[in-house]
Amino acid sequence: MEHVAYLALGTNLGDRERNINEAYRRIELAVGRIVRRSQPYRSAPWGFTSQNEFVNTAVCCHTTLSPHQLLAATQRIEREMGRTEKSKCGEYHDRIIDIDILLYDDMTVEEPDLHIPHPLMKERPFVMIPLEEIYKDEQTNDK
């Protein structure tokens, strides 16, 4: 069965445009077909201080992965692209790539390692602006 997942991507290290494009490529290979993607959105770091501005985007993809398989796939992409540490206890860092699951169908997941919808997305303009650009209620509009 095919599911609709919305992901947020962010990068503030190295060649940010290349990082985003490489993440798109890897998502297509490991997660599923990207059916919509937002324009890049530049933003200041959120939750920490850095000289490096972020580039953020959002994608909508069709996937056969379960929510936990999707989490594993996105974390693997982050590691393969060189991300060495995830944020812990609200301590954020510069990153080559960050991929967050925002939405998955109309599902709610509340588990220690996975929260869908993403619990902080509405507090983050750098997530909501790209998401609003591409969001479409697949359950009602595409049928």
Image (cartoon, helix red, strand yellow):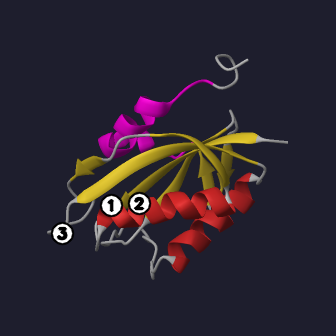
| Residue that carries the numbered disc 3 in the rendered image | 50
Comparing 48 with 59, the one in front is 59
The residue where tag 1 is placed is 17
Magenta stretch bounds: 117-137
Figure check: 58 above or below 137: below
The residue that label 2 is drawn on is: 20
| Gap between marks 3 and 1 measured at Cα | 18 Å
Mark 1 Cα-neighbour bin, 10 Å: few <14, some 14–19, many ≥20: some
Query: At numbered mark 2, what does the secondary structure look like: helix, strand or loop?
Result: helix
Classed neighbour count for the residue bearing mark 3: other residues with Cα under 10 Å, few (<14), some (14–19), many (≥20): few
- Tell me the amino acid under the disc marked 3: Ser
Dividing the picture into quadrants, the one containing residue 91 is: bottom left
Whether residue 62 is in magenta: the answer is no
Q: Quick check: can you spot residue 112?
A: no
The C terminus - image quarter: top right
| Count of picture labels | 3
* Type of amino acid at the residue the image marks with label 1: Glu
Residue 13 x/y as whole percent: 29, 72
Evaluate if marks 2 and 1 touch, with contact meaning CB atoms under 8 Å apart: yes
Looking at the picture, how far across and down is residue 33, in whole percent? 65, 48
Q: Position of 65 compared to 130: left or right?
A: right
Label 2 neighbour load within 10 Å: few <14, some 14-19, many 20+ = many
User: Image height check: is 126 above or below 24?
Assistant: above
Q: Residue at x 66, y 26 (%)?
A: 138
Q: Residue at x 39, y 66 (%)?
A: 19
